[in-house]
Amino acid sequence: MKKFILLLAVATLCFTNASAQDEAPKNEVGIYYGFGSLSNVVSIFGEAFTFSTGSQTGFWGPVGVEYYRHLTPLVAVGGMANVAGCKWDKTFGTDDELKTLYISIMPSVKLNWLRKNSFGLYSSASAGVMISTIKATDDLKAADSEVKNETATDFVFHVTALGAEFGKKFRAFGEIGFGERGVLCLGCRYRF
């Protein structure tokens, strides 16, 4: 019973809005670009084994959008969606013969360690689903009967160890973390 009362007290504190925060924006939307994402690592190591005689000729993303709703000054919930891709050339020629597209959708929780009018520090955690599609050119399919177009669905996550944001209604941000947003993620948000 003591544990239940303690849990109820903590939940009440977490979900009670401070009167000073009633004037603070409750919603935020943002866009971002990440560097060193999980999909990039998967494309380098996973496809390198199956496509071992080629080289990765390009990787982009993840490029994404996010939304958060602040329940309390400390806790915000929301989600994000992003897309990333890479190209491979099996014969070291000039044409990209294999293209992979990664689409991720993840619900998120954000903890605002410091939330001031023009500066904030936070951490976040996200988990969801990634849909990856691999498409090969007709020339590659003709040359190798094992190669075919594929679609897969996988679990994906992201943990932001530390994020910092600057600005009032429009905020620039940078994050250090691990997962599908990348080791380094940069972007901007609008608070309303």
Image (tube, rainbow, N blue to C red):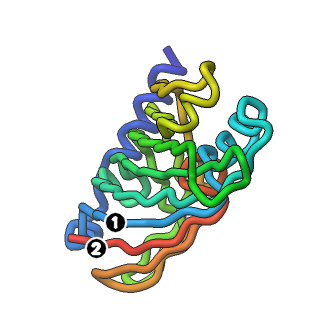
Q: CA distance from mark 2 to mark 1?
A: 6 Å
Q: Estimate how packed mark 1 is, as few (under 14), some (14 to 19) or many (20 or more) residues with alpha carbons within 10 Å.
A: some
Q: Which mark is residue 1?
A: none
Q: Position of residue 135 (x, y in %)?
A: 47, 36
* Amino acid type for the residue under numbered disc 1: Gly
| Horizontal arrangement in the rendering, residue 179 relative to residue 105 (left or right) | right
Taking 26 as reference, is 46 above or below it?
A: above
Q: Position of residue 93 (x, y in %)?
A: 68, 56
Residue at 39% from the left image edge and 74% from the top image edge: 188
Q: Position of residue 16 (x, y in %)?
A: 31, 49
Is 46 in front, or is 91? 91
Is 79 in front, or is 82? 82
Disc 2 and disc 1 in contact, CB within 8 angstroms:
yes
Describe the element under mark 2 as helix, strand or loop: strand
Q: Is residue 127 visible?
A: no
Taking 13 as reference, is 182 above or below it?
A: below
Quarter of the figure with the C terminus: bottom left
Describe the element under mark 1 as helix, strand or loop: strand
Residue at 62% from the left image edge and 19% from the top image edge: 146
- Would you name the residue on which mark 1 appears? 30
Q: How many marks?
A: 2
| Horizontal arrangement in the rendering, residue 179 relative to residue 85 (left or right) | right
Q: Quadrant of residue 73?
A: bottom left
Taking 149 as reference, is 56 above or below it?
A: below
Q: Estimate how packed mark 2 is, as few (under 14), some (14 to 19) or many (20 or more) residues with alpha carbons within 10 Å.
A: some
Q: Is residue 17 visible?
A: yes
Q: Position of residue 42 (x, y in %)?
A: 67, 40
Which of the marked residues, 2 or 1, is nearer the chain's N terminus?
A: 1
- Would you name the residue on which mark 2 appears? 190
Residue at 34% from the left image edge and 58% from the top image edge: 65
* Amino acid type for the residue under numbered disc 2: Tyr
Q: Quadrant of residue 17?
A: bottom left
